[in-house]
Image (cartoon, grey):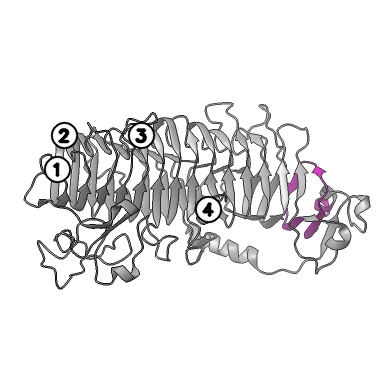
């Protein structure tokens, strides 16, 4: 029902309409219709073009209007053939505390803001949820394009605030920068969403194009805080060919939880570059994964913190360099009644063989992921590369659960786990790659684990009163594979390993897996690999890390247990032509 409603909204508010336009500028700009933007708004002008003068005002918009800034003068602005400028008109909030710089009251209306720089919003403790760069309430649609929203302060949503009022609102940020805003903590329910705050199942936000939510700060949710059913989609991401670009959710900070994003109370944040807005499916941009990078939290969830029924969805994304400085979950901390879903999309990918990457995330525990669900919520990871992650304990994953829960805490399929840890250097002990505690349940199928540099005294997997189900996989590391302090469930089936003292069974093989060139980051299987046509468990509907079918039967290789290859790569006779490295 939610998407039917919003499809109608989009159709309603994106129909081409022909409006007359007016211009706003000071006297020296010449030929201007107004000298004040407020005057033009008070007269309900349909389209307003602004000269790139500075405006100091707190504006209120309560009808359908398109506002475009940045014109050199009103003569050019009055010419319908003048292209949309690249400059911006600055709109400064006045010294009146508690007022938003721009307040939008929607009433089944559409508002377009283009080429603006919105700054100077300041909260006041006497005004509930005051401040904000842009505050949006009511039912309708807002599109913000080529705009910067910077240096605004509020108790929630320093940059952009969506009011929960029971109305359905759809907000698009296109090529827009939400930068350096602050959600100041004035109470236990404040300090949320430095860049963006949204609440309510009727609130939908799309962050697109070259947009970036960056260098915002809050108590929780430095970049974005989504609560009570709000849906946020981030399709923006860095250009992997240009390391200087900033797109996506980057470099935000939280003094407590969720440096990048904070998702609670049935809200959803989806990172997905294959969507234009919320409705149109597009081919994935081969150079721009949806990005969550370099965010930090002083406690849990450097990239994101998810609780109370919240959900994170990752498709064709890059999660890089996030840190939980004194807590758990460098990339994500997932706690009670919440889940993480990570998978490849059906519409192409930015890096074949590595469509989803978690890299260089750090924490005290769970360098990439910390999961501690308190109900039957199960997180799922598919076709993902984990590399370069670090922690004091649980270098990659730290999972805990409850003995009363019989559902998996985490399921991982057809994924590559390599080069995590650095043997205890630089303040990280790198103790155990995966730590299972207190009733956690981990299932890994079709996984390759190799060349991780954890502490010499540690095992790849440490199990304390938890359950582990591991099959059709390769574990080839210098360390012992498994150490246990009372298992609540254990299954090893069809494994290629470096030792079978800690891991034993009829289907556990101590063999060189035969990688093409692991030193160069290529963990595909050579034609002579022992792992080819080794296993018999399932795989009929799964795809390997290169998005190739499982269960390819190589004619000149004798099946050991079946025709399913162990590990994340399913070898085929043409892979030398079609496959890329996992680097």
Determine the secondary structure under disc 2.
Answer: strand
In the foreground, 180 or 196: 180
Residue carrying label 4: 238
Proximity of marks 4 and 3: CB atoms separated by less than 8 Å? no
Proximity of marks 1 and 2: CB atoms separated by less than 8 Å? yes
Proximity of marks 1 and 4: CB atoms separated by less than 8 Å? no
Residue carrying label 3: 391
Proximity of marks 1 and 3: CB atoms separated by less than 8 Å? no
The answer to whether residue 165 shows anywhere in this view is: no
- The spot of residue 34 in percent (x, y) is 88, 53
N-term mark: 1 or 4 = 4
Mark 1 → mark 4, Cα distance in angstroms: 41 Å
N-term mark: 1 or 2 = 2
Determine the secondary structure under disc 3.
Answer: strand
Residue carrying label 1: 490
Residue carrying label 2: 484
In the foreground, 64 or 338: 338
The C terminus - image quarter? bottom left
- The spot of residue 514 in percent (x, y) is 21, 57
Looking at the rendering, the stretch of residues picked out in magenta corresponds to 40-69
Residue shown at 6%/50% (left/top)? 506
The answer to whether residue 388 shows anywhere in this view is: yes
On the image, which quarter does residue 218 sit in? top right
Say if the magenta span includes residue 224. Answer: no
Relative vertical location of residue 91 with respect to residue 446 in this rendering, above or below: above
Determine the secondary structure under disc 4.
Answer: loop
Which mark is nearer the camera, 3 or 2? 3
Mark 1 → mark 3, Cα distance in angstroms: 25 Å
């Amino acid at each position: 029902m939610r998407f039917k409603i919003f499809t109608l909204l989009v159709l309603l508010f994106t129909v081409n309409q022909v409006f007359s336009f007016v211009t706003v500028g000071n006297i020296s700009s010449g030929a201007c219709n107004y000298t004040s933007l407020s005057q033009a708004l008070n007269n309900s002008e349909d389209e307003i073009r602004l000269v790139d003068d500075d405006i100091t005002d707190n504006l209120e918009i309560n009808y359908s209007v398109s506002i475009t800034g940045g014109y050199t003068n009103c003569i050019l602005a009055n010419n319908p053939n003048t292209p949309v400028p690249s400059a911006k008109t600055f709109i400064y909030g006045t010294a009146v505390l508690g007022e938003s710089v721009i307040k939008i009251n929607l009433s089944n209306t559409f508002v377009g803001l283009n080429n603006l720089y919105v700054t100077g919003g300041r909260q006041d403790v006497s005004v509930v949820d005051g401040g904000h760069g842009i505050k949006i309430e009511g039912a309708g649609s807002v599109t913000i394009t080529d705009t910067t929203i910077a240096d605004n302060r509020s108790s929630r949503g320093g940059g952009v605030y969506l009011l929960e009022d029971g109305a359905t609102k759809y907000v698009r940020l296109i090529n827009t920068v939400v930068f350096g805003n602050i959600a100041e903590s004035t109470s236990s329910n404040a300090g949320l969403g430095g860049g963006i705050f949204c609440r309510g199942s009727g609130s939908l936000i799309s962050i697109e194009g070259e947009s970036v939510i960056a260098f915002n700060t809050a108590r929780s949710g430095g970049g974005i805080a989504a609560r009570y059913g709000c849906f946020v989609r981030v399709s923006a991401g860095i250009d992997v060919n240009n390391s200087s670009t900033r797109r996506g959710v980057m470099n935000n900070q939280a003094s407590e939880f969720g440096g990048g994003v904070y998702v609670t109370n049935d809200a959803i944040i989806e990172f997905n570059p294959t969507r234009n807005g919320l409705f149109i499916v597009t081919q994935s941009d081969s150079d721009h994964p949806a990005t969550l990078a370099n965010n930090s939290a002083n406690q849990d969830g450097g990239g994101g913190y998810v609780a109370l029924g919240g959900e994170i969805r990752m498709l064709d994304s890059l999660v890089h360099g996030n840190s939980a400085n004194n807590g758990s979950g460098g990339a994500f901390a997932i706690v009670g009644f919440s889940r993480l879903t990570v998978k490849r999309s059906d519409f192409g990918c930015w890096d074949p063989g590595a469509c989803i990457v978690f890299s260089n995330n750090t924490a005290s525990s769970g360098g990439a992921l910390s999961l501690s669900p308190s109900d039957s919520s199960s997180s799922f990871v598919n076709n993902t590369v984990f590399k370069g992650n670090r922690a004091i304990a649980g270098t990659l994953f730290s999972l805990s659960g409850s003995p009363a829960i019989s559902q998996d805490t985490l399921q991982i399929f057809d994924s590559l786990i390599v080069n995590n840890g650095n043997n205890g250097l630089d303040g990280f002990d790198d103790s155990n790659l995966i730590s299972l505690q207190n009733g956690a349940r981990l299932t890994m199928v079709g996984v390759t684990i190799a060349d991780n540099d954890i502490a010499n005294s540690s095992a790849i997997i440490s199990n304390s009163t938890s359950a582990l189900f591991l099959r059709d996989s390769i574990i080839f590391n210098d360390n012992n594979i498994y150490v246990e302090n009372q298992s609540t469930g254990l299954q090893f089936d069809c494994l290629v390993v470096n030792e079978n003292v800690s891991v034993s069974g009829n289907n556990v093989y101590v063999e060189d897996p035969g990688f093409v060139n692991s030193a160069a980051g290529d963990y595909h299987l050579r034609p002579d690999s022992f792992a080819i046509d080794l296993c018999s468990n399932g795989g009929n509907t799964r795809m390997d890390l290169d998005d190739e079918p499982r269960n390819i039967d190589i004619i000149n290789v004798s099946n050991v247990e079946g025709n399913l290859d162990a590990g994340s790569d399913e070898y085929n006779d043409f892979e030398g032509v079609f496959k890329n490295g996992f680097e």
